Image: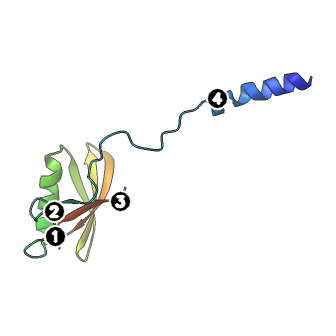
Amino acid sequence: MKYMSVIFVIILMQPVLFQEVHAWQHKKPVTPYGDFCPRCTKYGNCEKTMSHEDAKKAMLEYYYKKGLGVELEKKRGRFIRAKIKDKDKVIDVIIFDRSTGRIRSIY
């Protein structure tokens, strides 16, 4: 009876023991770590702080080349938080710095 109990427990735990866990993305990231807007220099120098409208246009330009859409979430001070979408699915959330043109993923 003891052996039957052990075999029964092993059979029940089999699906749990052999599951795959995907903790890391295997695809190329949508926003490379700390990328910059093409309207500013690569080192985060803009002539002046962009207006909210200019920043929106810059983000739309940047992600349009990748075939993605942008939905602005929050405008606070010099930062804008936006969702990056592929069709209707959110694939990244970013923060855009209007002073430096820096784009950072927070997803």
Q: Nearer the viewer, residue 59 or 18?
A: 18
Residue drawn where x is 12% and y is 54% of the image: 61
Quadrant of the frame with the N terminus = top right
Q: Secondary structure at mark 3?
A: loop
Determine the image quadrant of residue 99.
Answer: bottom left
Residue drawn where x is 12% and y is 60% of the image: 57
Q: Please tell me how crowded label 1 is: few (under 14), some (14-19), or many (20+) other residues with Cα within 10 Å.
A: some
Q: Please tell me how crowded label 4 is: few (under 14), some (14-19), or many (20+) other residues with Cα within 10 Å.
A: few
Which numbered tag is attached to residue 52? Answer: 1
Q: Secondary structure at mark 1?
A: helix
Which numbered tag is attached to residue 70? Answer: none
Q: Position of residue 67 (x, y in %)?
A: 18, 43
**Mark 1, mark 4: which one is toward the viewer?**
4
Q: Is residue 45 left or right of residue 21?
A: left
Q: Nearer the viewer, residue 88 or 37?
A: 37
Give the amino acid type for the residue marked by disc 1 in the picture.
Answer: His
Tell which circle, 1 or 4, labels the residue nearer the N-terminal end: 4
Q: CA distance from mark 4 to mark 2?
A: 48 Å
Which numbered tag is attached to residue 106? Answer: 3
Q: CA distance from mark 1 to mark 3?
A: 20 Å
Q: CA distance from mark 1 to mark 4?
A: 52 Å
Q: Secondary structure at mark 4?
A: helix
Quadrant of the frame with the C terminus = bottom left
Q: Is residue 7 left or right of residue 29?
A: right
Give the amino acid type for the residue marked by disc 4 in the picture.
Answer: Pro
Tell which circle, 4 or 3, labels the residue nearer the N-terminal end: 4
Question: Circle 2 sits on which residue?
Answer: 56
- State yes or no: discs 2 and 3 in contact (Cβ < 8 Å): no
Tell which circle, 2 or 3, labels the residue nearer the N-terminal end: 2
Most extreme residue toward the right is 1
